[in-house]
Amino acid sequence: MPEPATPRSAARAVGPRAWFGQVLLYALFALAIGVFSHWPTYRHLAAGAALIKLSLVHAGKPLGECRERSAEELAALPPNMRAPTVCPRKRSPVTVELDIDGAPAARIAAPPSGLSGDGASAVYRRLTVPAGERLIAVRLRDDARSAGFAYTLERRVTLAPAQVLVIDFDPGAGGITLQ
Amino acid sequence: MTDHGALAQRAPRGAVLWWSRLEQRLDRAFGASRNPLRQSGTLAFLALWLLAVSGVWLYAVLDTSAAGAYASIARLSDAPWSAGGLMRSLHRYAADAFVVFTALHLLREAVHGRFQHFRRFSWLTGCALLPLVAVSAVGGFWLNWDRLGQFSATATAEWLDALPLLAQPLARNFLGAAAVSDRLFSLFVFVHLGVALLLVFGLWFHVQRITRAAVFPPRALAVGTLATLLGLCVLAPVASQGRADLGVVPALLSMDWILLFVHPLMYATSAGFTWTLTLGAFGALVALPFVPAPVRAPVAVVDPHNCNGCRRCLADCPYAAITMVPHPLPQRGAELAVVDADLCAGCGICAGACPSSTPFRSTARLVSGIDMPQFPVDALRRAVQRALRSPEPVPIIAFGCAHAADISCLAAADVLAVPLLCTAQLPPSFIEYALRNGARGVLVASCHDGGCAFRLGARWNAERLAGTREPYLRARVPRTRVLPVQADIGEESRLREALRVLRARTIAQGARAEQARPAPDA
């Protein structure tokens, strides 16, 4: 009576079907990696659109006036801290308004940074607009105690498709800038 | 018949069953020991080594300046089939493969519930590596500084700006060409290379609590994977997508969705949603080990009176749970095994390795040097003795792992089915003991190679039965009466087939023995 065969172990797969299976699975793996590392193409910006980046960092004016310390106040302080003038730390938020072609596009009141509210205010906003000629109007107020805008800019620009227009603030260049 | 009742095999959950069936399908093509799903962790290591080799090559040619980076890499794309071009493509595809293999590895361990108790450390250290993988992978695109790198760097900055961490938006670093300086590129280099080095260091922690950590897949699988990736490099070489220009939006991009999917997701939803999703998923992974778990299995216990410090348990423990200390009873041995309860998996492999676990000892109660309280070797011996010494002796004993195919499916009038904590809990001497005490055949079922619930149990069992690892199954034991079989969850049919073969063998051997018996005198 012949010995019955031992069940084939799955530890080592051999034979044409196994080889075919391996080739197929390696090919599927390569296909998955190859396809999803390139495809589908990603459209980040619609055709015929341009991008406006409203981005600025600017410190608002202090919320209060500086004042002189009295002689009594100075005397109460340690000798190394007797500065004659004391200023409030907290700053005004910076308010920015952006109109595109006369329509409001952004209204931002950026609070001052820092635990004491004495740091610069920062604004970063992306706006997608159709390419072409656009009327850009920007207003900036950095003093909460005044009603108007200290800095304004209005300019007609022509934006090419996919162009990036950066609206920034540079006091050395006169205030609001377009790049 | 099932006799001892010490171990109840739990029915596998749906996800485990589903995953096991998937692995078994791949077994047919690759074999269990080279199955990519079972080897997903080692394949991730292979991808990492490929990243290291190709990365060193690329770093040698990379001009790490804002103005020169693009040209230095684009030169490689001009000759895609040159060694440099291949390395550039291999670096990208190996990174994709690394993420895929890592995800498969994580999913496999999660499906099997391997994140609690003694596995908590490995799980948590693995989770900690995920952000490093993401940061290093994304940062690699910036170094090239093409349009895709520009998009990725800007998107990452805008994503980080959604967190209230910095006073000034990071995205301001990418408003214009003047903002991107060589100093910023030094930061890019750190993000990509420094974090990758941290990742390698973290991997060392990840494998700290396991012994014989496999950091390279079986050779055939490594060769196949490398050949596949190289073939992909030749057929679809990676190319740059044009020099970065911060004055123009990279509107249309050939996107690596495997590595950069988070950017399109953010623009399709919002930075806040993406952060919530990312942190939520990460938090869920980190919280998994702390979800109330089933009661932990009892850990191994050492009996100093029976431990002679032979170190076999130390050599076989898959989780580095055993250390050796000077023996408090010097007449028993020089060293004593000590079990770290936090690290012990309760698999019983140590009990199977202990030379004092032999059932041939004449003591009324078999006490081993190291044993499992929930199913000691004495209970195992009594179960076998009851089956063989009953008025109707059971001719076939089937030992099997409680985490593999359900061995109790073989229980019958002529079969004693004995589930074990792990197949390697079985001292090979039990096979000889059963055969010398009347059993006609012994079936030993284990998990597949590479699929052992306790990492090394199936391997140790196979080596012990083959006589290449102590404790050996002695050479004089007739191998025709011992049938090892590997059968995973859901593969009970393999067990039944093996039992059919063993039954047929024992019947054939019985018939031959009958024929060989001298004829009675006329």
Image: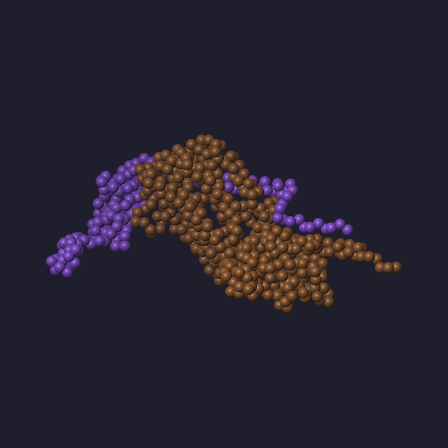
Q: Quadrant of residue B194?
A: top left
The colour of chain A is: purple
- Residue A88 drawn at (x, y percent): 20, 54
Is residue A98 toward the left or the right of residue B151 in the image? Answer: left
- Residue B233 drawn at (x, y percent): 50, 36
Q: Quadrant of the N terminus of chain B?
A: bottom right
Q: Quadrant of residue B188?
A: top left
Colour scheme shown: by chain
Q: Residue at x 52, y 63 (%)?
A: B327
- Residue B463 drawn at (x, y percent): 61, 52
- Residue B424 drawn at (x, y percent): 60, 57
Is residue A167 toward the left or the right of residue B214 in the image? Answer: left
Please tell me whether residue B131 is drawn above or below residue A136 in the rendered image: below
Q: Residue at x 44, y 39 (%)?
A: B56
Q: Nearer the viewer, residue B416 or B178?
A: B416
Q: Residue at x 16, y 55 (%)?
A: A80
Please tell me whether residue B244 is drawn above or below residue B22 in the rendered image: above
Q: Which chain is brown?
A: B
Is residue A57 toward the left or the right of residue B59 in the image? Answer: left
Q: Confirm whether residue B453 shows in the render.
A: no
Q: Confirm whether residue B95 shows in the render.
A: yes
Q: Nearer the viewer, residue A62 or B9?
A: B9
Q: Residue at x 39, y 39 (%)?
A: B143
- Residue farthest toward the right in the current orientation of the protein: B522
- Residue farthest toward the bottom in the current orientation of the protein: B364
